[in-house]
Image (cartoon, rainbow, N blue to C red):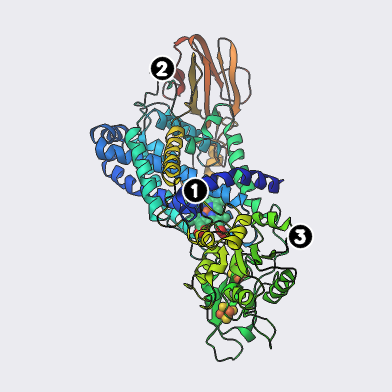
Amino acid sequence: MLQLLQKAGRWLFDPLRRVLDRGFGQQLNPLNFLGALSIYFFWIVTVSGIWLFIFFKTSVVGAYESVEYLTHDQWYLGGVMRSLHRYASDAAIITLVLHVLKEFLYDRHRGNRWFSWVTGVPLLWLVIPLGITGYWMVWDQLGWYVALTSAELLDWLPIFSDSMARNFLSADVLSDRFFTLMAFVHLIGLPLFLVFGIWLHVLRINGPRINPPRVLMAGSLIAMTVLSLVYPALSQGDVDMTTVPSSLGLDWYYLLVYPLMKYWSPGWVWGLLTGTSLLLCMVPWMPPMKGKSCAEVDLDNCNGCARCADDCPFGAITMEPRSDGKAYETEAVVDPGLCMTCGICTGSCPTATPFRRHTALSPGIDSPDLTAALLRKKLLEAVEHLEGNHRIIVFTCRDNARSSRLKSNPKNSQTAIVDIICAGQLPPSFIDFVLSRDLADGVVLAGCPGGDCQYRFGAEWTSERIARQRDPQLRKRVDNSRIALGWQEPWSVCGDLPKIVTALRESLPAVAEAMHGPPPGRKNPWKIPVTAFAYIAFAAIVGYLSVWPRFQLVDEGKAMISLSFSHAGQRIRECRKLTQEELNKLPPNMRKPDDCPRERLPIRVVFSANGETLYEAIRMPTGLWKDGSSNVYRRLTVEGGNQHLFIGMNESGESPDFDFALEQEVDLAPGKHLVVEFDDIQQSFVFKEE
Ligand code: HEM
Ligand code: SF4
Ligand code: SF4
């Protein structure tokens, strides 16, 4: 089932990747730097956030006013910074979602890669609240909605004994201290955890790509700045708790689940969020990756050169002090918990050479799944049927689906195919072996598209080894014009593997082009249109979903009523006067005239509008000893207009009578917000409209 999903997803993702390849080129395709781009957007958020904080006032009145000052009076800098802060945060969510999607679709989350996947999930629980608290701090109508809904969600958790949401129902309850707390959470608490989380996330990756290429950084910054100037981020009106905003521009990147609270209870929303996260954590084992062995070191052939440790993309090899008494200082040691069996270490081992005659082909490090000896055997078998003087041998990595078209033609006597785990598994000496022994006339190495190797660095390391820039280098005697690399797929010649093979066979200039891109004189006609369109489309999506489609908190023509109070129910039994005899038995410091039980009874509350019961509940006392007040909090919507409202409360359990009640005709205009409170001093209910 999941595999089917992966296949379907790749079917959509691949064309997007190909289009971007045409404009950006494979090495700069933004889809190869999604994690790094997310980090980069967080950098923009940090820098712009520092500027905003300099002017931000952490008080109920000051918060909104200071953001308005930045947006309008200082639009040229503060306004741009505010917009950049918002849009870069939104852009980070887009690249983050694509990052997760891509790792999943291309199966880069299973096996020993589970660690990066599983540590990625808590990052979502840090990033989303980071955005939510940001909107909260602006304290406009949206900030009020965010505060109220977040508090309703938090109230469902057994953390606070009193209702937090009640603080956001009338202006006189809200305190400045709350903004100081928010500033701490948003500016220090969550970002610190995020930095630690990202560090952990990439901990087991060798040489993680933390920074995208500079061109992409510049392009993204320009796109976000232009969006900020053309469509600046604005506040959505000062908070007026007596009315409900007619419609809100929601930032769907961060507030996607909030509208659900209009229809679901907070418990269901928490269920959805935790369920999705747990499911996400389990995905690497659905199904588990099985049957993969781990690279093995043969100390008889290891000279401790450390090339394998440098090249392993997953940091699975460490160089440890020599254990076999040989004259070398170190030896390679593989951690089976990290090895992804990509074979790249065999490609980097100088002892993996097929020229050996007298000793068995046993390199210092080898993959039991496909040993170097087996690879040589497969190669020799494959070339047996080759004929003519245009014989091509194609080494293709298993994940490269493009080789299937070549394989589907077994009668082809000019092309032979040898599957390897990853293009990086092939030691350059094998190419030398093929050409110097005249086993074929040309060699094609086919791998994943540039910059996006399934095993991270396979294609990159091999290109460098063949270009003689990385050890072990291809020997100088090998004629490079007889080699084509399939992942350096330029926009013109080699759309797919058969084309590369034909190009190698028929035309040497085409091979040069296949390997090194179009000649300098010839421009890529796709570059400007594709890159411009990509940046414009990206900025448009960022801007659109940051406020559209708009959300209606209450439907047209309706008004909102919040029931919000706490009241202590009666004690489970009456207090009793102690007799003098009983008092005498007590130590002097504990002599109280009354004996009162701590535990209290629940309260029963009924609320109706125009005779229709909208809320009826028995609320239990809070506290471990059931000695606290009972809390009532519920947001309701009613038709706007004249309403006959009734609220009744019984403080001694489930009795049908009411100890306190209020019945009143109220003119509730559509969009009005009325709060039903209990005045503890007057001991009566109040319908509070102002
Ligand atoms: C703040 C959010 C995140 C950031 C900044 C981030 C960043 C990164 C970076 C920089 C890498 C290294 C890429 C490379 O060098 O090839 C990476 C790898 C990875 N990430 Fe994330 N990531 C985030 C969230 C997530 C999430 C939510 C998931 C999945 C649930 C995830 C799954 C992975 C996986 C599986 C890898 C390993 C890829 C490999 O082994 O080739 N990441 N991430
Ligand atoms: S590359 Fe080969 S010889 Fe060098 S340390 Fe690794 S296993 Fe040993
Ligand atoms: S097979 Fe790949 S992951 Fe395993 S040790 Fe070798 S290079 Fe590292």
Circle number at residue 474: none
Q: Work out whether mark 3 precedes mark 2 in sequence or the reverse, and give the earlier one.
A: 3
User: What's under tag 1, amino acid-wise?
Assistant: Arg
Q: Is residue 441 or residue 321 the one in the foreground?
A: 441
Measure the C-alpha gap from mark 1 to mark 2.
61 Å
Q: Position of residue 538 (x, y in %)?
A: 45, 40
Measure the C-alpha gap from mark 3 to mark 2.
86 Å
Number of the front mark, 3 or 2? 3
Q: Does the image show residue 672?
A: yes
Q: Residues within 10 Å of mark 2 (few under 14, many from 20)?
A: some
Q: Position of residue 683 (x, y in %)?
A: 45, 21
Measure the C-alpha gap from mark 3 to mark 1.
34 Å
Q: In the visual, does 50 lie left or right of 485?
A: left
Which residue in the structure is indicated by mark 2?
689
Where, quadrant-wise, is the C terminus in this rendering? top left
User: What's under tag 3, amino acid-wise?
Assistant: Lys
Where, quadrant-wise, is the N terminus in this rendering? top right
Which residue in the structure is indicated by mark 1?
22
- Residue at 45% of width from left, 43% of height from top? 530
